[in-house]
Amino acid sequence: MTRLFLKDPLAILADGAEGGIVVEDGRIAELVPAGAAPAQPVDAVFDASRHVVLPGLVNTHHHFYQTLTRAHPAAIDKELFPWLTSLYPIWARLDPDSFRLSVRLALTELLMSGCTTAADHHYLFPKGLENAIDIEAEEAAALGIRMTLTRGSMNLSQKDGGLPPDTVVQDEDAILADSERLIGRWHDRTDGAMTQMALAPCSPFSVTKSLMIASAALADRHDCRLHTHLGETEDENRFCEATFGCRPVDYLEEVGWLGPRTWLAHGIHFTTEECRRLGAHKVGVCHCPASNAVLASGFCPVNELKAAGSPVGLGVDGSASNDASNLIEAARHALMVGRLNYRLAEAMTARDVLAMATEGSAACLGRGDIGRIAVGRQADLALFTLDELRFSGAHDPIAALVLCGATRADRVMVKGSWRVEDGMPVGIDVARLRAEHGAAARRFA
């Protein structure tokens, strides 16, 4: 119950907290106006005068295992479908040890970038890796980062007219049984939960309609969220029209996914009318600007979706199509890509993209307890310094994080505990992790 006062921040992304914030019992207990003192005594003081304080960043779409295949020669300079077909046979060689290292590395990178909550979309379950989601939960708990574990799935392989090879898919009964097991073990519905579950059939071209319908029913029964890739490429549109006789958003409605329980990854190729439909049903969209650019997939209609009522969050996407796991960098990517898309500087501001990375992402995950610095919210915070040469001369400290290209937080707090101190993750030997992960990655050359 120690009361910690983060005093006099250089800047803070919260109104009425210019003098700092008080953290108690893992929550934000008090906002302190400029020039004021906490209303009640505190037990400890942290001098935040060098720090720009943000709500902890929230990553709403990733594929941790892909850290093992960054900048892979088989996939460089390819668009989504050929990129996937090149990498699926390589990913089929995943094993528990290399997967665990891929998760640990991705989560560590995210923490160091100011991320306090991560959602990973894991859908590859080759033989021997049936407990992949449990591994992710264990690694997140060890690092002290919040996780939305999404039980991904694929059951439509090449022999059935899908994209993935037969060796990485599972049958529907096995998928649903494991989904129920994982929900029972890891889905914490309480305020301040450290782990929650979502169900995440991979994409229209790798799962059956039956699995989509059954997953929606299971999510409704257990009050968990739904996630999938949708609207990423024109190839996907053509596949849906040829296979299901409709466009992806129509398909989403047909399988019972058009509702506030759902958030989608990418959401690029939606018409104006489809944006209105998604917004009317409060379907969330995770914007993945770096991956969209690397794979030349297109521009997400972020402002149209937001105007229609869709929550829009931010994601780094897989580390083989980004190829980093850095959420503060993703905020800068979102600003640059957004301005290119709308050809108007005012269409996307630094504060807009930081809002996407915090409140917007929290809304995608259905969480009202994170994503904002406010009394009663979880004490998840990212503190950045402006000491590097890149920030010299910056006059707006919050905008500078995005415009000048921040890459690394100095301090990160999750649930009131420091998980990054002086730029380094607590309890992690970064040099050892780099060496072990690098050795594992060589097996995927």
Image: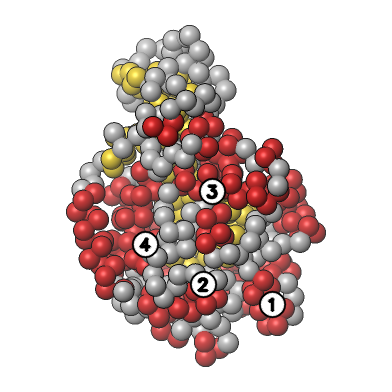
Q: Amino acid at mark 4?
A: Thr
Q: Is residue 23 above or below residue 106?
A: above
Which numbered dot is residue 238? 1
Q: Earlier in the sequence, mark 2 or mark 4?
A: 4
Q: Which residue is mark 3?
A: 333
Task: Say which quarter of the image contains residue 25.
Answer: top left
Percent x, y for residue 83?
A: 49, 74
Mark 4, secondary structure of its residue: helix
Task: Say which quarter of the image contains residue 432.
Answer: bottom left
Q: CA distance from mark 2 to mark 3?
A: 20 Å
Residue, x 80% and y 59% (percent of image)?
A: 273
Q: Nearer the viewer, mark 2 or mark 1?
A: 2
Q: Are marks 3 and 1 in contact (CB under 8 Å)?
A: no
Mark 1, secondary structure of its residue: helix
Q: Earlier in the sequence, mark 4 or mark 1?
A: 4
Q: Which residue is mark 2?
A: 78
Q: Is residue 278 visible?
A: yes
Residue, x 70% and y 82% (percent of image)?
A: 242
Q: Is residue 332 above or below residue 171?
A: above
User: Would you say 162 lies left or right of 20 here?
Assistant: right
Quadrant of the drawing holding the N terminus: top left
Q: Amino acid at mark 3?
A: His
User: Would you say 198 lies left or right of 64 here?
Assistant: right
Q: Are marks 2 and 4 in contact (CB under 8 Å)?
A: no
User: Would you say 355 lies left or right of 419 here?
Assistant: right
Q: Amino acid at mark 1?
A: Arg
